[in-house]
Image: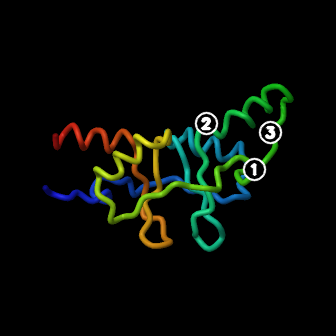
Amino acid sequence: MIVHRITSIMRRDIQTLAPETPIRQAISTLLDARAAAALVLDEDGQLAGILTQKDCFRPALHASYHQEWTGRVADQMSPNVITVAASDDVIRVAEMFLSHSHRAFPVMEGTQVVGMTHRSDVLAFMLQEG
């Protein structure tokens, strides 16, 4: 059996945000990039969390009710991020997508983010290879 590393299909062009980024700006970034999620990096470039489109609904609804945008990325992001290793096999990552409702996982090489893998990319790979 041939092992295909997740790095062969991961996305390297990813959206990143800082924890202090205003949430309205972060939502605009996600939408402009047509991204389902953005990684939140601290001042040292380390992974601090992930902000998904779903995370953005609460502040967006608040803004629609109260006619004002408040909050930062740190207020809405998920700080406990499930990641995959750059050395992981695509099949292992596919199994992770079965176990978790997430649409994307950050790909890590040690403590450094090197990309993102999306559920649709893994499924497309499996269709092509299968």
In terms of sequence position, does the residue under pointer 3 or pointer 1 come before the other? 3
Q: Nearer the viewer, residue 35 or 130?
A: 130
Identify the residue under disc 2: 54
Name the outermost residue toward the left.
Answer: 1
Instruction: Give the total number of marks visible in the rendering.
Output: 3
Q: In the image, what residue type sits under mark 2?
A: Lys
Identify the residue under disc 1: 75
Question: Residue 83, how many percent across, how many down?
Answer: 48, 57
Q: In the image, what residue type sits under mark 1?
A: Asp
Q: Residues within 10 Å of mark 3 (few under 14, many from 20)?
A: some
Q: Nearer the viewer, residue 20 or 76?
A: 76
Q: Residue at x 36, y 46 (%)?
A: 95
Q: In the image, what residue type sits under mark 3?
A: Trp
* Callout 1 secondary element: helix
Q: Residues within 10 Å of mark 1 (few under 14, many from 20)?
A: some
> Which mark is nearer the camera, 3 or 1?
1
Identify the residue under disc 3: 69
Q: Which numbered tag is attached to residue 128?
A: none
Q: Residue at x 86, y 29 (%)?
A: 66
Q: CA distance from mark 3 to mark 2?
A: 17 Å
Mark 1 in CB contact with mark 2 (< 8 angstroms): no
Question: Residue 75, how many percent across, how many down?
Answer: 75, 50
